Image (tube, grey):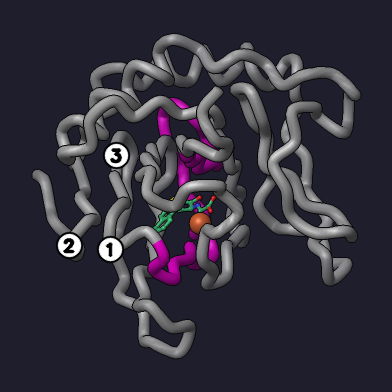
Amino acid sequence: RDVRLDEGALVLGGMARSIDRALLDALTVVERDAPFRHLLTPGGGLMSVAMTNCGAVGWVSDRSGYRYDPVDPESGKRWPAMPAVFTDLAARAANAAGFREFAPDVCLINRYEPGARLSLHQDRDEHDLGHPIVSVSLGLPAIFLWGGQQRVDRPRRVPLTHGDVVVWGGPARMTFHGVRALAEGHHPLTGSIRYNLTFRRALPRG
Ligand code: MD3
Ligand code: FE
């Protein structure tokens, strides 16, 4: 079932379910070349969510701040290419939400184990905030926190389950959001893990 959370935020319930195995197989290939790692925040803490990327650039964090980097700092090599099954799903989802010709240059992949969480934040490291973000949830369910335009706005709790795809854009693009600590559980395809793929356009065209 599709749910509009706000103007510009559309949940495409279960849209990725029919290709879940293909997505997880492609993820295995990406993580062989760019393993999941816990990034250091500028404040000096380790993130509880483990991350990796594929595409022309990758989102990274270290003591000097956040950035999109064409090179994986762990390997010194470029990030793995974005698998066609990823790119294709992102474009179809953006289209379904009314964003034509979405061409992501990065897929940030978040891996949650029980207890891992993402505190309330805005995504503002991208060059042009006019492009939407597409996110795909796989594995264990999570409670997504959907806030307002200010950090103090009390967030709504939105359950996201295996195969859910969400498109965020337009007036929803700068909304504060986060993920509550993952509960223990077992999923037949991922075991005790939740993955989230987020597709973005980070850099200017060309
Ligand atoms: C709403 N990831 O990586 S995806 C992130 O489930 C992040 O791992 C979460 O927030 C996760 O930055 C949520 C959904 C998402 C991503 C970006 C957004 C929602 C957003 C940007 C603006 C508004
Ligand atoms: Fe975010």
Instruction: Identify the mark nearer the N-term, 1 or 3.
Output: 3
Query: Any magenta on residue 176?
Result: yes
Residue 188 screen position, x and y as percent: 41, 29
Tell us which disc is closer to us: 1 or 3: 1
Q: Which residue is mark 2?
A: 7
Residue 77 screen position, x and y as percent: 84, 18
Which of 192/164 is in front?
164
Q: Eyeballing the image, is 181 above or below 149?
A: above
Q: Residues within 10 Å of mark 1 (few under 14, many from 20)?
A: few
Left/right of residue 13 with respect to residue 141 in the rendered view: left
Q: Which residue is mark 1?
A: 171
**Quadrant (top left, top right, bottom left, bottom right) of the C terminus:** top right
Residue 136 screen position, x and y as percent: 38, 37
Q: CA distance from mark 1 to mark 3?
A: 18 Å
For numbered disc 1, what is the local secondary structure? helix
Q: Amino acid at mark 3?
A: Val
Left/right of residue 72 with respect to residue 79 in the rendered view: right
Q: Is residue 116 visible?
A: yes
Query: Any magenta on residue 40?
Result: no
Instruction: Identify the mark nearer the N-term, 2 or 1.
Output: 2
Tell us which disc is closer to us: 3 or 2: 2
Which of 159/96 is in front?
96
